[in-house]
Amino acid sequence: MYSCADLKKGLKLMVEGEPHVIVQFDFTKPGKGQALYKCKLRNMITGSLFDRTYRSGESFEPASLEDRDMQYLYQDETGYVFMDNKTYDQVTLEEATLGDDKYFLIDNMEVKILLFNERGIGISLPNFVNLRVTEADPWVKGDTAAGNNKPATVETGYTLQVPSFVENGELIQIDTRTGEYVTRVKE
């Protein structure tokens, strides 16, 4: 069990039977009375945000979440399918659960799936992924101005800004945390 003293940003706990994460935290001690712990909580299943104020002395149940290494298999009409490499169990995540992370998934990629009661509620990708450019404007000779970027689309449909020298068919590295171009990759 957690106490109010354990509350901090990023802590995962159970509220009304569902897992929540603290996204903002503020401690105040008025001149009289008990200390107040103001938290902004995000429901890890629905994504909804709400504010709660707790008084010192309250206790909280830790969220029973499990991180499991899984492999991305394919996408179908129900969502994105992942397989546990040890038990061969499959978990399907909806597109809304993945958000923009769906653009960085490659077949057979190893990821971590966050599970609550054997239901997938989140994903952790590797920090970097290599994707092939499928659409980019051609490079114009002499176009060497510093900071000159152009839009490019990669094989998963994601569009990002890349340096002007990147061309169609090239393999590039993308930071999955920011969605930004890192470097070209030699094959």
Image: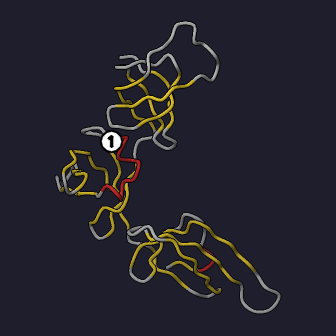
Relative to residue 110, is residue 47 depicted above or below? below
Relative to residue 162, is residue 24 depicted above or below? below
Number of numbered callouts drawn: 1
- Quadrant housing the C terminus: top left
In the depicted view, which residue is nearer to us: 120 or 135?
135
Relative to residue 4, is residue 65 depicted above or below? above
Q: Residue at x 41, y 23 (%)?
A: 136
Q: Where on the picture, by quarter, is residue 89?
A: bottom left
Amino acid residing under circle 1: Leu
Residue extending farthest bottom:
33
Q: Position of residue 149 (x, y in %)?
A: 55, 25
168 vs 183, left or right, is: left
Residue extending farthest top:
141
Q: Residue at x 45, y 21 (%)?
A: 184
Relative to residue 14, is residue 166 depicted above or below? above
Q: Residue at x 37, y 20 (%)?
A: 168
Q: Position of residue 23 (x, y in %)?
A: 56, 65
Q: Position of residue 173 (x, y in %)?
A: 44, 29
Q: Position of residue 63 (x, y in %)?
A: 42, 72
For label 1, the crowd category at 10 Å Cα-Cα, with few meaning under 14, some 14 to 19 and many 20 or more, is many
Residue extending farthest left:
88
Q: Considering the numbered disc 1 on the image, is that residue within a helix, a strand or a loop? A: loop
In the depicted view, which residue is nearer to us: 87 or 187?
187
Q: Residue at x 36, y 59 (%)?
A: 97
Please name the residue that numbered disc 1 is placed on: 105
185 vs 22, left or right, is: left
